[in-house]
Image (cartoon, grey):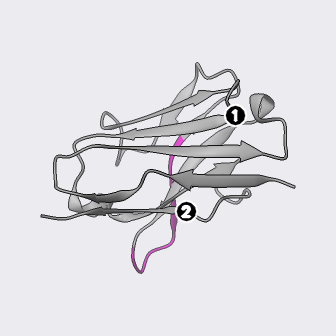
Amino acid sequence: EVQLAESGGGLVQPGGSLRLSCAASGFDFSDAYMCWVRQAPGEGLEWIAGILSGGVSTYYADSVKGRFTISRDNRKKTLYLELTDLKTEDTAIYYCAQGGLDGPRGQGTQVTVSS
């Protein structure tokens, strides 16, 4: 059974930074494409970043490019998302997902950007 557990969210001021983590189990993490998606209040799911199994190739939505960095540690079976220069519009629940936008995901971690 695929299990994903996100952590690291919180309340941060505009311009601040956070690091999200996602602990994975129940599947071959080192062979999986992984991504981060988010859901802002009243909105649908938005794909924001993806990373291939080897960790070298990464992809970003325009809304976060240059501010967020996705990475992974296959030995620790953990996915990361470094968020910098946060904006109020980044407020959302952040999920890690196996595969694409419609893949299994965890319970999410809340990121709130507010002064």
Identified at 51% across, 72% down, the residue is: 44
Compared with 2, 67 (above or below) is above
Magenta stretch holds residue 112 = no
Provide residue 50's location: percent of width, then percent of height: 57, 39
Find disc 1 in the rendering and name its residue. 77
**Front residue of this view, candidates 7 and 16:** 7
> Which numbered disc, 2 or 1, marks the residue that appears first in the sequence?
1
**Front residue of this view, candidates 76 and 102:** 76
Identified at 84% across, 35% down, the residue is: 28
- Specify the quadrant that holds the N terminus: bottom right
Provide residue 105's location: percent of width, then percent of height: 67, 58
Mark 1: which amino acid?
A: Lys
Identified at 78% across, 45% down, the residue is: 25
Give left or right: position of 54 versus 6. right
Quarter location, residue 91 = bottom left
Magenta segment range?
Answer: 41-49
Provide residue 98's location: percent of width, then percent of height: 71, 48
Q: Residue furthest bottom?
A: 42
Find disc 2 in the rendering and name its residue. 108
Q: How crowded is mark 1: few (under 14 residues within 10 Å), some or many (20 or more)?
A: some
Provide the secondary structure element on which disc 2 rests: loop
Give left or right: position of 107 versus 98. left
- Specify the quadrant that holds the C terminus: bottom left
Compared with 64, 113 (above or below) is below
Provide the secondary structure element on which disc 1 rests: loop
Count of all numbered marks drawn on residues in the image: 2
